[in-house]
């Protein structure tokens, strides 16, 4: 088991490193940091630009291989270089990763849990009112791109605030700047800011999971073991929950891994639209500012997230399904 | 032994066409209500997207200097944008592009996924490990980021390049499913039978394995249509997608979102059409799943 | 009151029948049960059960027999209230006089598992994969006795598991269902069923998916269970052989209705309904000295959506007369007390004392001239020498790792001559299918040689290989999965022809010719496999295999997935084809009953090795290896009298793990002979692997691998 885990982790590391490298190479060969400096007002002198580019390891006149070697050596010692504004990438990651992770974890937990619960219930009451309503809702939500969901939420928050004349919902930033309200006030402020982004992220997740769980549940409902459970004296409801749902959760774990990439992309959009300074917003900004090192760093972060999710779902899978355990 | 002696096939039987393996499938599909509704909506949208511009009194890049940001009227059915362009015409052209992007990207995606997945699952061993490793690598690469960086570089080559890029970053999950299915199909006795009668591997994959997961592929292709449209919207929203003078629903939404409250018509028409389009595609996909999957119990 | 439901007066008269005291009131009573399912999308409703009545008393065993689709399973599910909501059920189901029909789920749940319990057919999917078997048995205890503590329930679970014959139950209760074999899982199902001392146990084909040796064990367990609980048992099956020695009364169902009912001896010895005769005649019999052709019932059961007005069996009945189509015959009393049949010619059958042979015309199958030539002079079609196939044993789907080596095939040697059938027989997991796949792959085997039509596997040029592919064809077990569901029958049969470069016109004429050869309608080529029944599909598979005029046909359990009545038709077809086309067969089967009718020689396999091989006469008349004897003994006879008198050799346990075979003689762990040997003799079995040697004087073609083979003539 330990040997297996080490092998798995090693292959993860290789994948993560390769993904970051590919992102670095693509970014380094296509982005134009020189242009970024040239557009500055007032335009710096050519020497100044040259000096700055060399310092940041962004000079397009240095051979790509050499730049890559410098970057890779840095990464090997856990140093992702400097941003185009000459800040430490590592410090930026440290600051922004938490923001993104909070959003992703909260969104996933809320969306997936609600989705699974409602999907399972809809399946048990197939064609009932609840099933119809959730089906229509899920269908509609699945058809709306995450960006549009976020924008619509924002627009409705503005409208709601206008109508009520109060700032009920916040739709920009992670917290109110310069707020002096003590612990509880700060917390309330944070929650107030977090409601909409979390909702935006979890809505699409909820829709996808409720559909998927409903289908999985329907597949299991007619199985022989549910019949056996009822034949031994369980009521339909008890058999559903204890035997059908428990078994139907297993494929959902795999589904989670598959959707995680989309989730990360959605988190990016949500952060950007709601003005949270997380990794997702950073990547959009860094592409716009031709920031090669930041792009590579964000790729690294996202790759780590994907791998962590995949590892987590492997572990969950093994925990839920005795058939894959090594005895 | 008389069996090897050729016998004349009797005339009437020789005349009956022995074919039509898809006809029952089509019948089944048309009998599913959701598929029908979805198809009708999609066809309607296609008709609207291509015929609409012909009916519009305004040209694609014509500006009405008398009406900037004017609300919908008899003159401008969907109102006008900030530069006085007719929103109806723009939206229709955007709809055209979005439909094309969705369909083409889904087609490419499914073809790549089917081939990679089927070959990996059928041959297993080294080929499988190699292909799955590449698949994992693609899964780890953030597709949004790669597209955003790469596409601006290739934007001069037109929207088809964008579609290919999109497909290159969307095929992985389907490929994994196809692989899993292939592994189980490959042990089916009809595949063994074909192998033992001397049918070549490539032919087995194309004739036995892929057709038998056609339901998975068709359903997945439909889902990919909507994924592609949605991904394009997101990219366009951040300015990484299709670039002017081309418009898509995504780029229109991006522009409209900034003024959604003040000039709602610049936002809601294109958003509404996008939602209807994706909804219709999803309806078809969901209906297909039920119609094609013999295990599905959600059928009435 | 209709004729289908037993009246009190009639029940009085049935007191003469075997079984417990008839005066006792029925525990479980079903009368006039009707079940229909609404047809979706404008299809007609399906009436699966039409007026079925029965009652069982304490300690009594009732057998309900019928083909698939006869409504026997639906009626049992209705009895326990587990039909889907949309099913329409009418009639009456009474437990101790209390009406069960129409009770809500909560009340019904209290009865299920406590008063009425059920054992389902498929033990593979019948247990929840994510809970341990111990927990699942304990759950059955706790659900009806909520005050029982977890420990007490677990303790009771261990008792129950021990009772149904799970060795080392204390440890094995922690196993998950996937770690159990099919037979073991079925034992767990029985343990669950008897957990609360039910009054009635309904067994729905409890042994159908199992090997015959395991079937014999499960039947023993059921007898034990009945002894322990004193419950009434309703035993549902499609095989009249299985229930002959077990049940007190039999009811035969056809097209949702009872067509013959009565005490077991009456139904078996004084059969009055042609359908029952057909079912009896289609069971391969080992108790007859000469092999006689099996009796197939032609055609298929009627569609339950639009039933013809007359006797539903008339279209398949060899003695149907025009009056049969007039009205459905009522179930009327014939002959002995309680014996009733639904046939207007029952009186005639009784008067003329007709038997199955009189009713069903049986055509004698001609013999191929090749079979007259002595075996030694015939060409060798297939030669297998010291073949072995070992593959790594992996555990876990996610965390895969190698935990050992499976010795699937371990040194096999045999040959098949022209025009001959060699049957390879053994329990599942003995390596017989692996052997087939090794032969068919035409690759270099890991060990030993395979020579097909004089050409060695792995040493053929591509052209030779293709030629051999044409000469060796295969028919698979499962008619569901052996035909590509997306193809039309024409394409399926044409595939080998296309592959081997036949011209378009030749393909067409050949396909139509093949359809006729296997007894199918030519016009059916445009249909898809799903539109055919199991037996017909198997015929399509045979047609495909014959397309290239092969010399050797490899048959992988071609009939084990079929109902007995259909099985007989396919076996007869195979026999006829062999005679007409001079084919050689390598026939794999898991029991000896089917093989007797078709094989010339038999090889019995156990854990990758042949333990006994010889001509069919010698093997059946005088089996010398204890395993062969056990296999023969496990086959039930469709004859209640003989079956009751018979002493069964019931093998202990399952096939040992092929990754860790026992030392010396591999069979010793389950051997009935080993069990009675002296300690000294046993050590030979433990230490030395027996060779396959001729043991019997006068039987030149019989060899067994046993140190203590029975060489004296036995009955």
Image (cartoon, coloured by chain):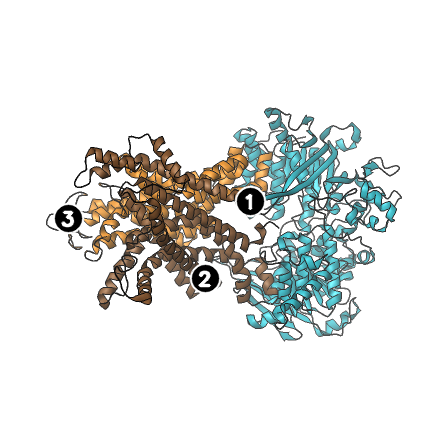
Chain colours: A brown, B orange, C cyan
Q: Is residue C80 visible?
A: yes
Tell me the tag on residue B84. Answer: 3
Rounded to the nearest whole Å, what is the CA distance between mark 3 and mark 2?
Answer: 49 Å
Tell me the tag on residue B32. Answer: none
Rounded to the nearest whole Å, what is the CA distance between mark 3 and mark 1?
Answer: 64 Å
Neighbourhood count class around disc 1 (C-alpha, 10 Å): few under 14, some 14–19, many 20 upward: few
Residue C560 position in % (x across, y down): 67, 47
Q: Residue at x 56, y 46 (%)?
A: A2
- Label 3: state its secondary structure: loop
Residue C203 position in % (x across, y down): 67, 61
Residue annotated with mark 2 = A117
Rounded to the nearest whole Å, what is the CA distance between mark 1 and mark 2?
Answer: 34 Å
Residue C675 position in % (x across, y down): 83, 51
| Residue toward you, C165 or C220 | C165
Residue C85 position in % (x across, y down): 53, 65
Q: Is residue A141 left or right of residue C114?
A: left
Q: Is residue B102 visible?
A: no
| Residue toward you, C274 or A281 | A281
Which one is in front in this view, the residue at disc 3 or the one at disc 2? 2
Which image quadrant for residue C338?
A: bottom right
| Residue toward you, A123 or B298 | A123
Q: In the rendered structure, the residue with mark 3 lies on which chain?
A: B
Q: Is residue C344 left or right of residue C540?
A: right
Residue annotated with mark 1 = A4
- Label 2: state its secondary structure: helix
């Amino acid at each position: 088991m330990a040997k297996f885990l080490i092998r798995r982790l090693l292959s993860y590391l290789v994948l993560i490193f390769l993904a970051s490298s590919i992102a670095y190479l693509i970014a380094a060969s296509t982005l134009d940091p020189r242009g970024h400096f040239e557009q500055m007002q007032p335009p710096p002198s050519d020497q100044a630009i040259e000096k700055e580019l060399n310092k940041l390891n962004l000079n397009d006149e240095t051979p790509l291989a050499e730049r890559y070697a410098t970057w890779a050596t840095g990464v090997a010692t856990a140093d992702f270089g400097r941003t185009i504004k000459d800040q430490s990438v590592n410090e930026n990651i440290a600051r922004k990763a938490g923001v993104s992770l909070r959003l992703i974890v909260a969104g996933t937990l809320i969306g997936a849990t609600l989705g699974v619960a409602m999907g399972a219930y809809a399946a048990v009451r197939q064609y009932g009112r609840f099933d119809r309503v959730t089906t229509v809702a899920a269908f509609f939500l699945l058809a709306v791109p995450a960006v549009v969901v976020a924008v619509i939420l924002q627009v409705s928050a503005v409208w709601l605030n206008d109508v009520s004349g109060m700032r009920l919902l916040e739709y920009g930033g992670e917290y109110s700047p310069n707020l002096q309200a003590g612990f509880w006030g700060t917390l309330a402020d944070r929650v107030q800011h977090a409601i909409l982004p979390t909702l935006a992220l979890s809505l699409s997740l909820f829709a996808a999971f409720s559909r998927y769980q409903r289908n999985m549940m329907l597949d299991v409902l007619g199985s022989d073991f549910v019949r056996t459970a009822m034949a031994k004296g369980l009521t339909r409801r008890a058999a559903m929950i204890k035997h059908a749902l428990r078994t139907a959760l297993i494929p959902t774990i795999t589904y989670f891994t598959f959707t995680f990439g989309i989730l990360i992309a959605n988190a990016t959009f949500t952060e950007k639209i709601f003005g949270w300074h997380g990794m997702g917003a950073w990547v959009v900004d860094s592409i716009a500012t031709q920031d090669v090192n930041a792009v590579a760093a964000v790729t690294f972060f996202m790759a780590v997230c994907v791998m962590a999710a995949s590892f987590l779902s492997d572990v969950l899978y093994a925990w839920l399904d005795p058939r894959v355990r090594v005895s | 032994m008389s069996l090897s002696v050729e016998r004349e096939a009797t005339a009437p039987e020789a005349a009956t066409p022995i074919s039509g393996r898809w006809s029952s499938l089509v019948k089944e599909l048309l009998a599913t209500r959701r598929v029908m509704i979805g198809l009708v909506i999609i066809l309607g949208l296609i008709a609207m997207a291509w015929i609409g511009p012909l009916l519009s009194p305004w040209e694609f890049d014509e500006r009405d200097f008398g009406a900037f940001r004017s609300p919908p009227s008899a003159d401008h059915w969907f109102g006008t944008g900030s530069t006085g362009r007719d929103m109806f015409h723009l939206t229709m052209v955007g709809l055209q592009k979005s439909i094309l992007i969705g369909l083409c990207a889904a087609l490419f995606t499914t073809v790549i996924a089917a081939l990679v997945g089927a070959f990996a699952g059928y041959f297993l061993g080294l080929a499988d490990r190699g292909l799955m490793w590449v698949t994992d690598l693609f899964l780890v690469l953030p597709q949004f980021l790669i597209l955003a960086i790469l596409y601006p570089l290739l934007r001069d080559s037109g929207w088809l390049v964008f579609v290919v890029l999109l497909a290159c970053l969307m095929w992985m999950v389907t490929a994994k499913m196809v692989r899993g299915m292939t592994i189980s199909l490959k042990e089916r006795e009809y595949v063994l039978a074909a192998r033992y009668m001397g049918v070549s591997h490539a032919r087995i994959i194309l004739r036995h394995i892929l057709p038998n997961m056609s339901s998975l592929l068709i359903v997945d292709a439909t889902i990919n249509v909507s994924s592609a449209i949605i991904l394009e919207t997101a990219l366009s929203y951040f300015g990484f997608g299709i670039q002017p003078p081309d418009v898509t629903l995504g780029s229109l939404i991006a522009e409209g979102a900034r003024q959604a409250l003040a000039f709602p018509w610049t936002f809601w028409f294109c958003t509404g059409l996008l939602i209807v389009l994706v909804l219709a595609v999803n309806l078809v996909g969901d209906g297909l799943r039920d119609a094609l999957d013999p295990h599905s119990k959600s059928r009435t | 009151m209709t004729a289908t439901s037993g009246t009190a007066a009639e029940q009085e008269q049935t007191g003469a029948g075997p079984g417990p005291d008839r005066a006792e009131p029925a525990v479980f009573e079903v009368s006039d049960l009707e079940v229909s399912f609404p047809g979706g999308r404008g299809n007609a409703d399906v009436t699966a059960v039409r007026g079925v009545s029965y009652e069982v008393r304490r300690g009594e065993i009732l057998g309900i027999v019928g083909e698939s689709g006869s409504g026997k399973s639906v009626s049992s599910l209705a009895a326990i209230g587990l039909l889907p909501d949309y099913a329409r059920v009418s009639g009456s189901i009474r437990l101790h006089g209390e009406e069960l029909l129409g009770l809500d789920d909560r009340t019904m749940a209290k009865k299920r598992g406590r008063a009425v319990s059920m054992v389902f057919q498929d033990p593979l999917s019948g247990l929840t994969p994510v809970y341990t078997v111990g927990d699942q048995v304990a759950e059955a205890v706790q659900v009806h006795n909520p005050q029982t503590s977890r420990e007490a329930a677990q303790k009771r679970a261990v008792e129950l598991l021990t009772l149904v014959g799970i060795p080392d139950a204390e440890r094995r209760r922690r196993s998950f269902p996937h770690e159990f074999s099919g037979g073991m899982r079925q034992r767990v199902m029985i343990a669950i069923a008897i957990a609360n001392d039910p009054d009635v146990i309904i067994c729905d084909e409890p042994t159908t998916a199992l090997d015959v040796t395991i079937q014999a064990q499960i039947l023993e367990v059921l007898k034990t269970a009945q002894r322990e609980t004193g419950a009434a048992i309703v035993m549902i099956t499609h095989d009249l052989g299985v229930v002959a020695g077990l049940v007190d009364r039999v009811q035969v169902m056809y097209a949702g209705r009872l067509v013959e009912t009565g005490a077991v001896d009456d139904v078996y010895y004084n059969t009055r309904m042609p359908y029952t005769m057909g079912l009896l005649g289609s069971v391969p019999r080992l108790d007859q000295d000469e092999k006689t052709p099996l009796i197939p019932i032609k055609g298929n059961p009627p569609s339950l959506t639009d039933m013809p007005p007359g006797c539903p069996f008339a279209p398949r009945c060899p003695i149907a007369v025009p009056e049969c189509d007039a009205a459905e015959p009522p179930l009327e009393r014939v002959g002995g007390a309680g014996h009733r049949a639904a046939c207007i010619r029952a009186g005639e059958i009784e008067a003329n004392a007709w038997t199955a042979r009189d009713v069903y015309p049986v055509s004698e199958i001609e013999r191929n001239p090749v079979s007259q030539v002595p075996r030694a002079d015939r060409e060798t079609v297939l030669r297998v020498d010291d073949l072995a196939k070992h593959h790594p044993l992996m555990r876990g789907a996610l965390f895969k790792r190698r935990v050992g080596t499976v010795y699937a095939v371990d040194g096999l040697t045999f040959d098949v001559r022209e025009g001959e059938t060699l049957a390879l027989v053994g329990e599942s997991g003995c390596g017989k299918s692996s052997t087939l796949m090794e032969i068919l792959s035409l690759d270099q085997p890991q060990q030993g040689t395979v020579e097909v039509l004089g050409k060695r596997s792995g040493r053929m040029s591509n052209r030779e290989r293709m030629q051999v592919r044409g000469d060796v064809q295969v028919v698979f077990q499962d008619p569901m999965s052996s035909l590509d569901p997306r193809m039309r029958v024409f394409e399926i049969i044409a595939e080998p022809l296309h592959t081997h470069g036949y011209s378009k016109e030749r393909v067409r004429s050949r396909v139509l010719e093949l359809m006729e050869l296997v007894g199918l309608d030519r016009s059916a080529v445009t249909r898809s496999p799903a539109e055919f029944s199991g037996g017909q599909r198997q015929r399509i598979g045979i047609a495909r295999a014959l397309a290239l005029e092969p010399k050797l046909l490899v048959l992988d359990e071609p009939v084990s997935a079929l109902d007995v009545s259909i099985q007989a038709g396919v076996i007869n077809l195979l026999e006829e084809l062999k005679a007409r086309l001079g084919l050689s067969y390598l026939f794999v089967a898991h029991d000896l009953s089917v093989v007797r009718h078709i094989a010339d020689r038999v090889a019995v396999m156990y854990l990758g090795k042949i333990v006994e091989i010889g001509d069919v006469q010698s093997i059946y008349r005088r089996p010398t290896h204890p395993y062969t004897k056990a296999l023969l003994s496990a086959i039930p006879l469709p004859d209640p009298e003989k079956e009751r008198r018979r002493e069964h050799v019931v093998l202990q346990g399952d096939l040992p793990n092929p990754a860790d075979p026992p030392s010396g003689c591999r069979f010793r762990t389950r051997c009935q002979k080993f069990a009675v040997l002296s300690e000294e003799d046993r050590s030979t079995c433990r230490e030395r692997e027996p060779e396959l040697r001729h043991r019997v004087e006068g039987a030149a073609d019989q060899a067994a691998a046993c140190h203590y083979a029975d060489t004296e003539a036995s009955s």
